[in-house]
Image: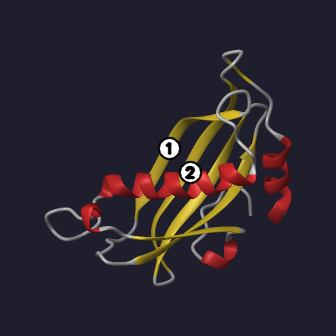
């Protein structure tokens, strides 16, 4: 099950709900593609709270984001972001996420993130809470 974007919400152990906003629309009355990155960031923030990220010694840096758009989203819509830790390295890890609207996937993403200590200005080993969440669905 690792390293594969999953197409059903039940396949993801972590869920984050959100509602589209008026300002998210483009001139065609669809949610603008760039806004999906903000939605994914909101979802990751919910994981950061799980992991007690402090933005100083115990922090994270996004190294890469890959996103595939599957279908348009209209405003207003209720969305759910399914997330899971899909890969663990020594100092980096991946979060796979899919945004769902009416139980249908709208976009998928993989975010590669590095654990970082801003006080000492260096990357650090993966935090134990992230390892625990990687093992959550194995």
Q: Hey, which quadrant is residue 89 in on the image? A: top right
29 sits left or right of 11 in the view? left
Image coordinates for residue 125, horizontal then vertical, percent: 80, 30
Image coordinates for residue 134, horizontal then vertical, percent: 79, 54
Name the residue tied to disc 2. Answer: 110
Name the residue tied to disc 1. Answer: 65
Q: Hey, which quadrant is residue 32 in on the image? A: bottom left
The color scheme shown is secondary structure
Could you say which is closer to the camera, residue 111 or residue 31?
Answer: 31
Q: Residues within 10 Å of mark 2 (few under 14, many from 20)?
A: many
Image coordinates for residue 54, horizontal then vertical, percent: 69, 37
> Can you say whether 69 is above or below 120 in the image?
below
> Can you say whether 67 is above or below 99 in the image?
above
Classify the position of the N terminus by image quarter. bottom right
Could you say which is closer to the camera, residue 20 or residue 68?
Answer: 20
Could you say which is closer to the camera, residue 66 or residue 48?
Answer: 48
Dots 1 and 2: beta carbons under 8 Å? yes
The furthest residue to the left: 27
61 sits left or right of 79 in the view? right
Q: Secondary structure at mark 2?
A: strand
Q: Residue at x 33, y 73 (%)?
A: 73
């Amino acid at each position: 099950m690792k390293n594969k974007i999953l197409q059903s919400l039940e396949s993801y152990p972590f869920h984050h709900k959100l509602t589209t906003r008026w300002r998210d629309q483009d001139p065609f009355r669809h949610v603008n593609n760039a806004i999906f990155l903000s939605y994914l960031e909101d979802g990751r923030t919910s994981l950061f709270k799980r992991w007690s990220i402090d933005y100083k010694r115990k922090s994270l840096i996004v190294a890469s984001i890959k996103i595939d758009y599957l279908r348009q989203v209209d405003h207003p819509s209720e969305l759910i972001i399914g997330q899971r830790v899909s890969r663990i390295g020594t100092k980096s890890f991946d979060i796979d996420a899919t945004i769902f609207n009416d139980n249908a996937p709208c976009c998928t993403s993989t975010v590669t993130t590095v654990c970082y200590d801003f006080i000492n200005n260096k990357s650090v080993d993966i935090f134990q809470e992230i390892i625990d969440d990687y093992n959550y669905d194995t």
